[in-house]
Image (cartoon, helix red, strand yellow):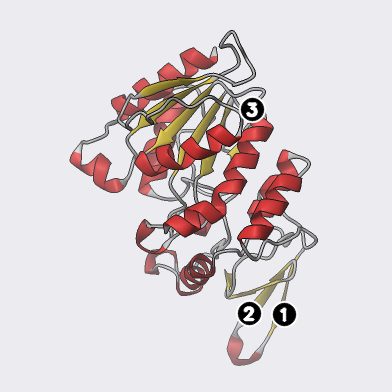
Amino acid sequence: MLGCCGVGFGAVVWLRGDVIWVGGVSREPVRPGSGWPEDPASPETPVALDAAAVRDLAASAGSLGELTARQSVCRACPRLVAWREEVAAVKRRSFAEEPYWGRPIAGWGDSEPGILIVGLAPAAHGGNRTGRVFTGDRSGDFLFASLFRCGLAAQPTSVTAGDGQRLISARMVAAVRCAPPANKPTTEERDTCAPWLAAELDLVRPWLRVIVCLGQFAWQAAWAQLGQAGFALPRPRPAFGHGAEVWLPLITEADGDGGVLLLGCYHPSQQNTFTGRVTGAMLDEVFERARAVAGL
């Protein structure tokens, strides 16, 4: 519920759920269950405070909904928690009048996806602000335009949670769920976050046919989790590259059916798109290939 009351010095305090907004802007990260669009968590959602708790809570989530709720309140990496919340409090000048999500970004999209898109981590003023991965920044603009052209997104833009955007037969996750300083998570942070990805892979595996890795970090992060999810991994690990393809059969499937195709794709970072290292046509080619393999 949204209400307001007057306070000293002419300020206006808006109460949205149990979050305090001053002049329409939240002073703190969004609290679970306080009314943010698409927030999967509630005040009762258990919070992981260390790597062991991440493993336990990821493994014990009984549904995709519960898993994403637990992902969205994780506090296991002190450096990432401090950074994401500092960014949410200080804000970028161009977004100074907007509230920031300031929490981990959960997996998002179709609950029965034929295609899983794996990125590096949320952007400090993109997903960390909007609450949805690849949303509200230049990378997201580039990516969702391609997904829309390829029939995998309902709209050509992804501006903020609750904007009507939806993924079609696709799901999107980040290998590391919190925005990292300088966009560089540590190896320890990647490993701490890994059980969230492993559990998500396990829950969507019956429908999954293609995994698109946006960048080398996502390629590396997905590899170990695919082994845990029951896929046979070739040795040595194939090198990442744009358009690289690796077929990974399920270990339990003797005839090779039921596996997934791992596809490499250059990350649509601002640097890559500005320099032409990756173009819209290059992204379209990868996603059209993913659609064909997934039978969409």
Pick the residue in front: 223 or 45: 223
Work out whether 86 lies above or below 140: below
Q: Quadrant of residue 23?
A: bottom right
In the rendered image, is residue 296 in sight? no
Between discs 3 and 1, the one toward the N terminus:
1
Between discs 1 and 2, the one toward the N terminus:
1
Q: Is residue 64 left or right of residue 174?
A: right
Pick the residue in front: 119 or 151: 119
Name the residue rendered at 38%, 22% in the picture. 245
Residue 110: where, in percent of width, then height?
63, 31
Residue designated by label 1: 5
Cα gap from disc 1 to disc 2, whole angstroms: 6 Å
Q: Given the image, on which type of amino acid does mark 1 rest?
A: Cys
Name the residue rendered at 64%, 91% in the picture. 8
Quadrant holding the N terminus? bottom right
Name the residue rendered at 63%, 39% in the picture. 200
Q: Is residue 227 left or right of residue 281?
A: right
Pick the residue in front: 200 or 135: 200
Pick the residue in front: 98 or 29: 29
Name the residue rendered at 48%, 47% in the picture. 135
The crowd level at tag 2 (other Cα within 10 Å; few <14, some 14-19, many 20+) is: some
Q: Are marks 1 and 2 in contact (CB under 8 Å)?
A: yes
Q: Are marks 3 and 2 in contact (CB under 8 Å)?
A: no
Residue 251: where, in percent of width, then height?
59, 21
Q: Given the image, on which type of amino acid does mark 2 rest?
A: Val
Q: Is residue 131 left or right of residue 157?
A: right
Residue 205 tag number: 3
Cα gap from disc 3 to disc 2, whole angstroms: 48 Å
SS of the residue at dot 3?
loop
SS of the residue at dot 1?
strand
Work out whether 273 lies above or below 83: above
